[in-house]
Every structure is written in C-alpha cells, then in structure tokens.
C-alpha cells in the first residue's frame, strides 16, 4: 500500500516537476536468461507490476520483458541483438554469463542504447552494473550477532553451492566479520547448497562433533533446514540467521510466538529488477549515473517479521518493489 | 530437377519464409546492419553444423560438439591471445585427439555416441581448468575479422556463403569428401576400393575438429570473451541444423549448403519467435514446432521423390 502511494507520488512529482517526464517516448526491454525458480518468477512479476504502472503513467512508452528459453549465453546474445533491431532505447539485463554477452552489449552501446545489468552483471565497461555486495551481506550477519550475543560464542557456518562466486563472496564477508569480532569462533562449516533439505542433512551430520553453538550464519534458503536439524538433535536452538524465504519466516514467527525467539533475516529482493528499470529510466532522462551501483539488502527484523511474512507467498521469498525515488537514492549513494 | 536439388528446396524455402516473416515484423532488420545483427551469431553455429555434418557423414554422432567448441573458445580467449604458439599447439593437439577418436571408434567398434558423450566431460573439464571463471579476451585480429564491414553485403552473409562454398567443395567435390560420404553409405565398398577405412574415418573426424575449432574462434571473435559453458547448446543445434538442411542420420547423405542454411534457419527461428513476442514458456515448443513443420515438408518431398 505504502509502495503504491510512494509510486503514485513519484509519478506525480515527475508530472509536477518537469511536465511529462523526458522519457515518455522511450522504450526499455528486459533481457532475462532464466525463469525457472521462485526468485526469478517473483522478479518477473515485480517487473511486470512496476513497469506496467510506469507505462500507464506515461513515464516510459514500453517496458517489455523477454526471457531466453534455455539459459544459454549465446541464446541471450542473440536476444540482445534482436532488441537492438527492435529499436529499444535501453536494455536491462540479467545475464547468463558476465563475459559471454560482451560482444552483443558492445553492439548495443555502439548504437547508443543504454545497457543496465543487474543480479547477473556483465563486465563490458560500457554497461551499468546494479550489483549485490555479497561480502557486505555476509558481514552484516556478524554485525547483528555482535549486538544479539555480546559475549560471543561458537558459530556454525552454512555455505552455499561450492565453486559459485556468490558462495565465496558471502563466506569471505562472514569470515571478515569474525576476524573483527574475536569473541566469535567458527566451530564448523558445511555446504547447504542454498536448499533446506541439503542444509538439514549437512547440519545433522556435523552436529554431533560440535560444541554448543550460539549462532548459525547462513546464505539464505538454508535456515529452516538448520533449525530442523537442531530440533531433531535435541540441542538448544541457536540464533539462526534467516534468508527471507517464506518457510524460514514462518518458522521464525512460530518460534517467536512460542518462546520469544529472536533473529534477523537478510537477502536480496527479487524486485531488484525494478530498481534496474528505474536506473535505466534515470539514465535515459539524462541524469549522470555512476557505472557501478549497489543493491540495498532487504533485511527483516523482529518488528517487521509479521508484515513481511504476510506479503510473502507460500514457497516464495520476501520481496519489495523499488520506486523511482529509491533508484535516485541508490544513485546518490554511489556518488 | 535432381533429387539433391529437390532436397535443398525445403530448407531454402523455410529460410526464405522465416526471413520474409522477420522483415515483415521488423523492417529495420532488412538493412546492412540489421542483417548482420540478425545473423552474425549464426556463423559459429554454421561452422559447428558443418563439423557435425562431417561426423554424421560417416554414420556417427558427436555429442561433445558443444563442449568442444566451448573448450576451443576458452583456449582462444586465453592461450591464443597471450601465447599464440602454445594456443595453436593446443588446438593442433585437439585435432589429433579427434582423429584418434575416429580410429578408436573404428578399431574397437565402439558406438560414437558413447565415446563422444564421454569426451564431452573431458572437454568441459579442460575448459574449466583453462578458464575457471568466465573471462579472457579475444585476440584483436579475430575481433577485427568478425566485425569487419565488407562493402554491400554484411559479414554474416559473406561468411555463411564462404563456409557453404568451402564445405561444398571439400565434401561434395574432393576425393576425400567422396570417400567420407561413401564410408557412411557403404563401408565395405570403400574397403574393397582399396582405400583405408580407418584413415578415412580419422580424416573425417580431424576435418570435423578443424571446423569446430573455427566455430569456437568465430564465437570468441563475436562475444569478445569466453566461458566454459558458452556453446553447450551447439551440440543439439548442430545436429538439428544438419537434419534441417537435408542430411540424414545414416547413409552418408549430407548437404553442406543445406547444413549452413539449416543453421541460419535455426538462428532466425529464435529471432522470429522473439519478434512475435511469444512467451518464453512456449518458445522451446514453438521452435520444435518449426522443426517438425520443416521435417514434415521434407518427408512429403521424399514421398514425391520415391513415387517418381
């Protein structure tokens, strides 16, 4: 509700400020490489919702979403070249590969098309990047634990899928946080592959060999599985950092109501696609935008739990759609 | 009209129909730059299709095509740029390995599908070793070659015609080409004519490797950098391209010109569907429908041919 009001006011501000926005005749396309999981589905839904409204309000002329069928870089390169032919003014891209699209993206830049990559970013220098600072995301977990557990204690780290850079980045952030806070010690580390069932098995396997655990640092999609493993082993429940998944939030809510359990939850909202959309719109509007921008995290705390749980679909992930003003803030922050 | 010409008619018609559809929906495509954007990514696919066609000409199937092209792309974006001599050596060695595969498949009477499937893991593994994270960059001469702007006709068309012509001369007109196709048609005849069957098969594989290497290099020239998984879809695309272009799985019946047209048709089909704004959920299905339509047409022509 507040979002809609915010958006409406943003649109109004546009109308009041500069007459109809300068981008009203501009067309923006979304090039997406994959739609096969709940995060991507939510991402596309957010895009459709926010850009649909923007088109209705006359902020832009069109904002069409395209997804490749096979999640392959060469296919997406062809898709981007098609968009150049279709005469879009800006292309927002979630890339299958950080490098393999460079040729196609260069072609787009060369004819004056604005290219904004997000989530799956590209390293072609002419494109803008709305990137996730995964290291900061890992470190923020320690910042929370530092206040929640002033005495420190043993931590269990659940990592993601081995060999994926996201896993390395989040883990590096966590380890940096531990190095700064010597009252914490990582007593064990397992790979949960960002999946509840894998995390549960992995945690159950390592638990017997561990001392008392005060906190579990995670990467998202693994908190519920960890909680199940602790409960099954009859061990005291540590503070498990959650990752905004609906099952995690639901479990947290149950525990909160039953025994006042406290924790926090952090992840990237799929609505980041709408942030990239507004960034592209701002660039088309002639604003001076730095090439590298950072996505804000979506963090859920004890007091915002209920509201977020309510809006998160079953089996989904907590989401937030961004407004033009959010984009302006992010741009300002990067300066 | 000869049967071979008749076979070529269906792919040519399919390509013309798709091209007309694309131009109708997106008039901008009917220009020098438009055609290049539309078709430049078909060049590596056409080369990979010719490579696959050579393997299919001897009644085998190469399931490692995509992985091998990816491997070549990784070598091109790293060694070939920084240490050209070493890069060339690696690529030459891979041609020898391909020839060796032909020999092993023949000597041990192994199914090529199994051997090449196994090799696909080897190529992918090597590609990951060479380039653990996506990156590397294209040698400047290669980038220049793939973005060259010849007068009047765009690079994508010139390259496609050139590939079709060279492959046609090589496969349809040269002695080696005749032997390769004869091996697929009737291996015993080849043996009785006094030609070494092993050498012919090895040559077919080596030649396929050369075309696959050209495919990987062309791809890097277009993308400017590589990724260990960059060309995985080329395995199925290349097989579909050969069949679409009038080739057969057995009997040594292949058509190099048809194969190039098949590769162009497959590339255009994707663009056509995306211009149509078909939802991605349906796109694979729609691509399949186009394939079935073309193959059904061909079946019809085959029947007509048989009745005559």
Image (cartoon, grey):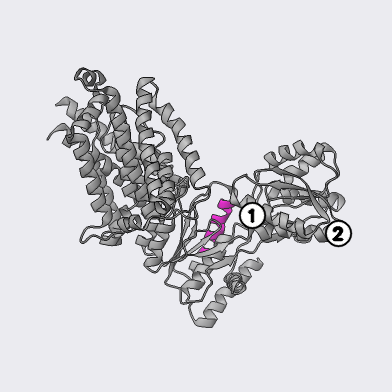
Among numbered discs 2 and 1, the one appearing first in the sequence: 2
Picture disc at residue A150: 2
Residue beneath the point at 41% across and 40% down: B68
Q: Is residue B144 visible?
A: yes
Q: Where is residue B41 in the image (x, y as percent from the top left)?
A: 35, 51
The quadrant holding residue A105 is bottom left
Q: How many marks?
A: 2
Residue beneath the point at 29% across and 42% down: B262
Q: In which quarter of the image is the C terminus of chain B?
A: top left
Position of A271 compared to B170: left or right? right
Q: Can residue B276 be seen in this view?
A: no
**Which residue occupies the foreground of this view, A95 or A27?**
A95
Residue beneath the point at 34% across and 38% down: B209
Secondary structure mostly seen in the magenta stretch: helix
Q: Which chain carries label 2?
A: A
**Residue tagged 1:** A169
The answer to whether the residues at label 2 and label 1 have Cβ atoms under 8 Å apart is no
Q: Mark 1 lies on which chain?
A: A
Is A266 one of the magenta-colored residues? no
Which segment is the magenta one? Answer: A39-51
Position of B120 compared to B154: left or right? right
């Amino acid at each position: 509700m507040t979002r809609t009001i915010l958006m409406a006011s943003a649109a109004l501000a546009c109308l009041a400020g500069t007459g109809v926005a300068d981008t009203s005749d501009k067309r923006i396309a979304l090039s997406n490489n994959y739609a096969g999981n709940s995060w991507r589905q939510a991402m596309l839904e957010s895009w459709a919702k926010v850009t649909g409204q923007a088109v209705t309000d006359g902020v832009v002329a069109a904002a069409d979403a395209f997804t490749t069928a096979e999640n392959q870089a060469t296919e997406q390169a062809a898709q981007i070249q098609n968009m150049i032919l279709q005469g879009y003014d800006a292309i927002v891209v979630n890339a299958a590969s950080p490098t393999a699209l460079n040729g196609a993206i260069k072609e787009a830049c060369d004819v004056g098309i604005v290219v904004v990559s997000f989530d799956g970013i590209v390293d072609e220098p002419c494109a803008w990047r709305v990137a996730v600072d995964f290291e900061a995301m890992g470190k923020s977990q320690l910042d929370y634990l530092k206040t929640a557990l002033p005495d420190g204690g043993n931590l269990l780290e659940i990592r993601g899928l081995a060999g994926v850079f996201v896993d390395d980045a989040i883990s590096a952030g966590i380890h940096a946080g531990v190095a700064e806070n010597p009252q914490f010690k990582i007593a064990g580390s397992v790979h949960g592959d960002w999946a509840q069932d894998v995390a549960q098995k992995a945690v159950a396997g390592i638990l017997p060999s561990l001392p008392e655990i005060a906190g579990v640092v995670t990467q998202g999609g693994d908190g519920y599985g960890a909680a199940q493993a602790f409960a099954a082993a009859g061990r005291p429940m540590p503070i498990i950092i959650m990752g905004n998944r609906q099952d995690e939030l639901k479990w947290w809510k149950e525990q909160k109501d039953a025994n006042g359990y406290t924790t926090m939850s952090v992840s990237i909202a799929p609505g980041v696609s709408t942030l990239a959309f507004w960034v592209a719109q701002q660039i088309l509007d002639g604003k001076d935008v730095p090439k590298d921008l950072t996505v804000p995290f979506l963090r859920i705390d004890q007091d915002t739990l209920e509201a977020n749980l309510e809006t998160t679909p079953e089996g989904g992930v907590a989401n937030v759609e961004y407004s033009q003003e959010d984009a302006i803030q992010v741009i300002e922050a990067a300066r | 009209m000869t049967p071979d010409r008749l076979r070529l008619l269906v792919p040519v018609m399919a390509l013309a129909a798709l091209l007309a559809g694309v131009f109708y929906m997106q008039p901008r495509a009917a220009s020098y730059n438009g055609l290049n954007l539309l078709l430049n990514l078909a060049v590596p696919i056409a080369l990979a299709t010719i490579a696959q066609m050579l393997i299919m000409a001897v009644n085998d199937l190469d399931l490692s095509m995509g992985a091998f092209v990816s491997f070549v792309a990784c070598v091109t974006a790293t060694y070939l740029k920084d240490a050209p001599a070493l890069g060339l050596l690696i690529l030459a060695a891979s041609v020898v390995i391909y020839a060796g595969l032909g020999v092993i498949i023949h000597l041990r009477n192994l199914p090529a599908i199994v051997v090449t499937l196994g090799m696909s893991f080897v190529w992918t593994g090597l590609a990951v070793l060479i380039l653990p994270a996506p990156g590397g960059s294209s040698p400047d001469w290669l980038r220049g070659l793939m973005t060259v702007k010849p007068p009047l006709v765009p690079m994508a068309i010139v390259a496609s015609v050139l590939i079709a012509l060279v492959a046609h001369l090589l496969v349809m007109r040269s002695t080696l080409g005749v032997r390769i196709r004869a091996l697929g048609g009737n291996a015993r005849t080849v043996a009785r004519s006094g030609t070494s069957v092993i050498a012919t098969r090895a040559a077919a594989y080596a030649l396929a490797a050369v075309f696959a290497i050209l495919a990987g290099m062309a791809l890097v020239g277009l993308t400017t950098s590589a990724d260990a998984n960059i060309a995985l879809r080329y395995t199925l695309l290349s097989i579909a391209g050969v069949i679409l272009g009038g080739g057969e799985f057995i009997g040594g019946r292949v058509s190099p010109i048809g194969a190039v047209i098949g590769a162009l048709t497959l590339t255009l089909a994707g663009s056509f569907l995306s211009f149509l704004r078909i939802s991605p959920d349906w796109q694979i299905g729609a691509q399949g429908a186009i394939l079935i339509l073309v193959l059904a047409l061909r079946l019809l022509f085959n029947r007509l041919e048989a009745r005559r």
